[in-house]
Image (cartoon, helix red, strand yellow):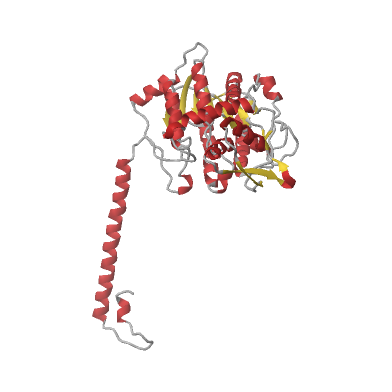
Amino acid sequence: MSHIDHDNPSTPGKFKMEKSSYMNRIRWHYSSLAKLTFWSFVLFLGLILVFFFKSPTSTSSPLPSDLYRRSLRTYSWGGPAWEKRVRASSRTRSRNGLSVLVTGAAGFVGTHVSAALKRRGDGVLGLDNFNDYYDPSLKRARQALLERSGVFIVEGDINDIALLKKLFEVVAFTHVMHLAAQAGVRYAMENPSSYVHSNIAGLVSILEVCKSANPQPAIVWASSSSVYGLNTKVPFSEKDRTDQPASLYAATKKAGEEIAHTYNHIYGLSLTGLRFFTVYGPWGRPDMAYFFFTKDILKGKSIPIFEAANHGTVARDFTYVDDIVKGCLAALDTAEKSTGSGGKKKGPAQLRVFNLGNTSPVPVSDLVSILERLLKVKAKRSVTKLPRNGDVQFTHANISSAQMELGYKPTTDLQTGLKKFVRWYLSYYDSGKKSAQ
């Protein structure tokens, strides 16, 4: 209750207030309000100054909303020492070597691709924001692995245009391998904005900087088999319709393909999209079924085995990471030069999309049986209906285009690939040093 309320009668009726008393109260009220406004302004100004002086000038601006908490943070970059590391990592060791910027380099596929490029003498610079979609310590371990082979990972966000422009000022990249993305089908129901932020806005940020670079790099980027959505015709071909996404993740990847077409058409960027089919292997993602099945089987926990309507089988075209890497490198090697200069198109440019799969769909129940044999532990299976969360019943890749144009030929079957994964898993999480969360 305010000061003036105390002077009002508690019941309706006429009352008389002295003019001087009333004016004194008004003066007091506005005087207090003026003081409050003044000190609020001082506090606000102080907060701005603190933020300004504490934040480095060469950082990306953090967004206040929690919607993007897994994507944007404040990162420090720049300076002579930093530029020296960027140049050294990007320097080629072979005459015709590529100089490649790999986004999402601390991710599962990004780590393997970066290591393979470096091994053959290419210059490689990584970029990753180390978000917490899954355990960041696994990403840091991958980072350490790459650093031992001479790959420097810049810690930053793909939506930080100032950082991207700086990287292209320091290094004239011949190629970009764009693998950074918000992965996972089910998480989109919890944090849909993170998918738009990373998979759409992030791709546009990369393309915007690449279109203005001189020379423009050729770009290979990760699309997804999820774009086939609710298609029932198998195997999935690049000529099939992709306008029936079953998840927001799939929709953002489909949007990415349309955006790529636009930048190719307007700016002459050479663009190759790769539709990955259920990639697995050592250093994999903990949110993938084969990974958390392994963890839960070892812990004696029940694992969910999904089945479709009418007891239909749920199957995936599991593709070993080394086969995916071969496809990625082949896409980089066969990518033609972009035809634009400084943001202006000078002629038609290459635009491609390829399936990278294994061509042998395996029921998820068979995946579990293989893991049981490798781990020598019986799984506690819990059969449940396939939820309406974006998961599809099956995936199956037609890879004829990749075979013809990239020389792509997967060689690792699921039994062999899972054996390599389990060996890595037991080694990585051995002796209680690390916890499989």
Tell me where residue 371 appears, x and y as whole percent: 60, 33
* Residue furthest bottom in the image: 13
Asked whether, in this view, residue 137 is left or right of residue 299, the answer is: left
The residue lying toward the viewer, choosing from 64 and 433, is: 433
Q: Is residue 256 above or below residue 21?
A: above
Q: Is residue 100 above or below residue 29?
A: above
Q: Is residue 355 above or below residue 131?
A: above
Q: Is residue 420 above or below residue 294?
A: above
Q: Quadrant of the N terminus?
A: bottom left
Asked whether, in this view, residue 110 is left or right of residue 365, the answer is: left
Tell me where residue 170 appears, x and y as whole percent: 42, 24
The residue lying toward the viewer, choosing from 372 and 97, is: 372
Count of all numbered marks drawn on residues in the image: 0
Residue 156 appearing in the image: no
The residue lying toward the viewer, choosing from 347 and 77, is: 77
Q: Quadrant of residue 17?
A: bottom left
The residue lying toward the viewer, choosing from 332 and 276, is: 276
Tell me where residue 404 appears, x and y as whole percent: 69, 20
* Residue furthest top in the image: 95
Q: Quadrant of residue 162?
A: top left
Residue 88 appearing in the image: yes
Tell me where residue 27 appears, x and y as whole percent: 26, 71
